[in-house]
């Protein structure tokens, strides 16, 4: 009996232990599966929140772009300044709020004559979620009645234009847009080349030297030369100049000088290794000579009542400025403005009454506008599209009635960084 009971107990304990282990295994599996399910659910919830926050931050950035591209917005105002103030640069980032988030307009930059980019950062308060986008705009606008359009070309001539030797035109930043235009005829010979279109009114010879199209114009297409502001020239009736030099002014050798708005009653000579910075309008009653290895920089205007001679290895870098002659000299032997040697200039070269003669190996970046133009030698006239897009009127004279009107910004590109 005792042995039988003992045997029964042993059998019972073995069965009970197996069941207990099985129960424990099942419970453990259920706990593992339950925990995994909870973790998955939690992760999905977190991902959903992050996605929602990310979309909200992106929506904030998009809203910031749309708000600020309208009149009175930061991007709109910056583009307007770029179009009307050639020396403008975007300053510090501008912050704001939109669609429940915060944003910063980091930069607004000019990519081409009418193309601009804005970089916008956004974030949601109390989170680490941030977004950054770059929007590309095209500026659509009209110009007032004072706009002439002559600075839209590498070379514009009110009368006949001649290009010979190895003279050539091109453009930057987009090449093969170095267009030329004449209210008269265009005469191309030698190895001259126009890397752009040629617009002519009285015929063209050497049209095979035009890489683009040769386009005839009629009398209704004639462009007017911009007028020189009266206060620039009439020193008797206007108190425009703060400083007056009674005679000739010259700088040479290693002289360094800053010339601000002034009237020079004689001639102006800059030679040797002199370095002169020009600010404002410099009216010269006589002739202007820039020669040797001298350098003229700044953003002002040199206005000569007589002739201008640019020679040697001199450089005239007047970003958004101009060198102007009012002389009516119209022969190649004695032009109103002569650029020769290895002179390199970056500015508008303007002679509304006389001839501009370009010779030697010097290059001009900007725009050349004369009553007549003779380009010879090996020089390149490089039409700077960013520079010239700001010339709604004569450089230095402000935009006036020729300024930007009816500006609107059209989004043409969108990228999340």
Image (cartoon, helix red, strand yellow):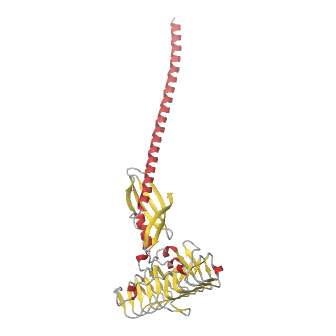
The answer to whether 34 is drawn above or below residue 335 in the figure is above
Q: How many labels does the image show?
A: 0
Image position, residue 402 (x, y; %)? 43, 76
In this view, the residue in front, 406 or 66, is 406
Direction top: furthest residue: 1
> Which residue is at 52% across, 23% downward?
22
Q: Which residue is drawn at 46% across and 57% down?
A: 132
Residue 82 rendering spot, x and y as whole percentages: 44, 71
Query: Viewed as shown, does residue 184 lie left or right of 53?
Result: right
**Quarter-wise, where is residue 249 in the image?**
bottom left
Q: How far from the left and from the top, in percent, is residue 135?
A: 48, 61
For residue 70, above or below residue 274 = above
- Camera-side residue of 22 and 148: 148
Question: From this viewpoint, is residue 313 visible?
Answer: no
Is residue 329 positioned above or below 135 on the image? below
The percent coordinates of residue 204 (x first, y second) are 62, 83
Figure check: 234 above or below 39: below
At 45% across and 50% down in the image, what residue appears? 55
Residue 151 in sight from this viewpoint: yes
Q: Which residue is drawn at 56% across and 80% down?
A: 218
Image quarter of residue 254:
bottom left
């Amino acid at each position: 009996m005792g042995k039988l009971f003992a045997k029964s107990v042993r059998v019972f304990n073995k069965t009970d232990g197996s069941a207990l282990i099985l129960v424990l295994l099942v419970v453990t599996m259920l706990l593992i599966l339950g925990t995994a399910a909870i973790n998955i659910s939690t992760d999905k919830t977190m991902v959903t929140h992050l996605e929602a926050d990310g979309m909200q931050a992106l929506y904030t950035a998009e809203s910031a772009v749309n708000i600020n591209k309208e009149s009175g917005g930061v991007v709109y105002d910056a583009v307007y300044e770029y179009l009307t103030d050639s020396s403008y640069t975007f300053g510090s980032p501008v912050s704001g709020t939109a669609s429940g988030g915060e944003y910063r307009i980091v930069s607004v930059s000019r990519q081409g004559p009418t193309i601009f980019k804005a970089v916008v950062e956004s974030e949601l308060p109390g989170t680490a979620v941030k977004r950054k986008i770059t929007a590309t705009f095209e500026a659509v606008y009209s110009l007032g009645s004072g706009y002439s359009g002559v600075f839209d070309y590498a070379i514009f001539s009110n009368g006949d234009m001649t290009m010979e030797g190895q003279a050539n035109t091109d453009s930057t930043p987009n090449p093969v847009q170095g267009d030329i235009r004449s209210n008269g005829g265009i005469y191309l010979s030698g190895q001259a080349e126009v890397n752009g279109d040629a617009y002519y009114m009285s015929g063209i010879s050497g049209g095979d030297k035009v890489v683009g199209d040769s386009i005839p114009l009629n009398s209704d297409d004639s462009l007017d030369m911009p007028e020189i502001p009266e206060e620039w020239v009439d020193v008797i009736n206007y108190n425009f100049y703060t400083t007056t030099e009674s005679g000739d002014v010259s700088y040479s050798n290693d002289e360094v000088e800053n010339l601000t708005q002034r009237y020079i009653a004689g001639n102006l000579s800059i030679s040797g290794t002199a370095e002169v910075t020009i600010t404002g309008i410099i009216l010269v009653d006589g002739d202007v000579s820039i020669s040797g290895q001298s350098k003229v920089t700044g953003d002002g205007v040199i206005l000569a009542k007589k002739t201008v001679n640019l020679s040697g290895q001199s450089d005239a870098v007047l970003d958004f400025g101009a060198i102007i002659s009012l002389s009516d000299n119209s022969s190649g032997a004695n032009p109103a403005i002569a650029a020769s040697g290895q002179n390199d200039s970056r500015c508008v070269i303007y002679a509304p009454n006389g001839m501009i003669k370009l010779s030697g190996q010097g290059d001009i970046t900007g725009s050349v506008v004369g009553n007549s133009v003779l380009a010879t030698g090996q020089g390149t006239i490089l039409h700077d599209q960013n520079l010239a897009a700001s010339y709604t009127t004569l450089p230095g004279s402000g935009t006036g009635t020729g300024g930007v009107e009816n500006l609107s910004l059209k989004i043409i590109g969108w990228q999340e960084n």
